[in-house]
Amino acid sequence: MTADCADRLTPLGVMVLALLREGDMHPYEMIRLMRQRHDDRLAPITNGTLYHTVARLQKLGLLAEQGVDRHGNRPERTTYSLTEAGRAIVPEWVRRELPRVDRPDQFRIALAESHNLERSEVLELLEQRRRALSERYTYHRDGLRKASDLAVAPQYLVEIEREEALLEADLRWLDTLIQRLEARNFAWGQDPTGRPSSRYTNEREAAHA
C-alpha cells in the first residue's frame, strides 16, 4: 500500500506528511508554520490546496483526525496525526527521489526532508545522484566539444552551455555536502533525546499565538 501511495503523493502532500512527523496539528497551524519557514519556495501553498491535500491524505489512510477544538471566537479546527503508513511514507519517498536527476522539483523537497533518513543512507543516495549527474555532465561536455569540432555556430549551443554550467555547479555543491556529511561534525537527523528541536518548539508557540 505504501509504495502505491508514494506514487500518488504531490509535493505538497509530502510536505504535509513531513510536517506531521514533528507533531499533531490542524491545517491552520500547518499553513502558518510552512509560511513561516518559507516552504512556499518549494511548492505553492494556499488555504484551498492545503485543505484539499489534507482531505486527500486522509482518504489515502495516511493521516487521521485526532479531535476538534475551538479557542474563543475562532472557528473549530480539526487536529490530524499520522497513521503508521503516513509515518513510513516520507522516508520511502525521499529514498526514491533523492538520487534522481530527472525531477528537480521533487529533488528539492526530498533534499529538504532528507534529515528523516540516517546519515549513512543519505550519503549512499547522494553518491548515486552524483554518479548520475556526472554522466549527464560528461554527456553535455563531450557534446559541446564535438559541436566545436564541427564548427557549429555558438548561437545554437547556448542552452547546452547553460546546462553544462548548471551541472558542473551542482556537482561542486554536491561534493561539498557529501564531505560535510562524511566529516560527522555536521549535525544530522532528529535530536538524539527524541525531543522536538528548539526551532520547532518556538515555531509552534508562534503559530498558536
Image (cartoon, rainbow, N blue to C red):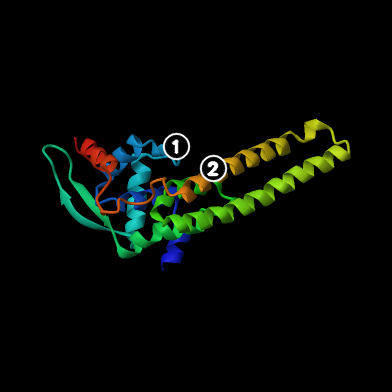
Of the two numbered discs 2 and 1 in the rendering, the one whose residue sits closer to the viewer: 2
Residue 74 lies in quadrant? top left
Mark 2 or mark 1: which comes first in sequence?
Answer: 1
> On screen, 83 above or below 152?
below
Q: Which residue is mark 2?
A: 176
| Residue that sits furthest to the right in the current view | 150
Q: Amino acid at mark 1?
A: Arg
Q: Residues within 10 Å of mark 2 (few under 14, many from 20)?
A: few
Residue 60 lies in quadrant? bottom left
Image quarter where the N terminus lies is bottom left
Name the element at disc 2: helix
Q: Which residue is mark 1?
A: 41
Name the element at disc 1: helix
How far across and how far down the image is residue 188, in percent?
39, 49
| Lateral position of residue 194 relative to residue 117, left or right | left
The residue drawn where x is 81% and y is 41% is 145
Q: Amino acid at mark 2?
A: Thr
| Residue that sits furthest to the top in the current view | 155
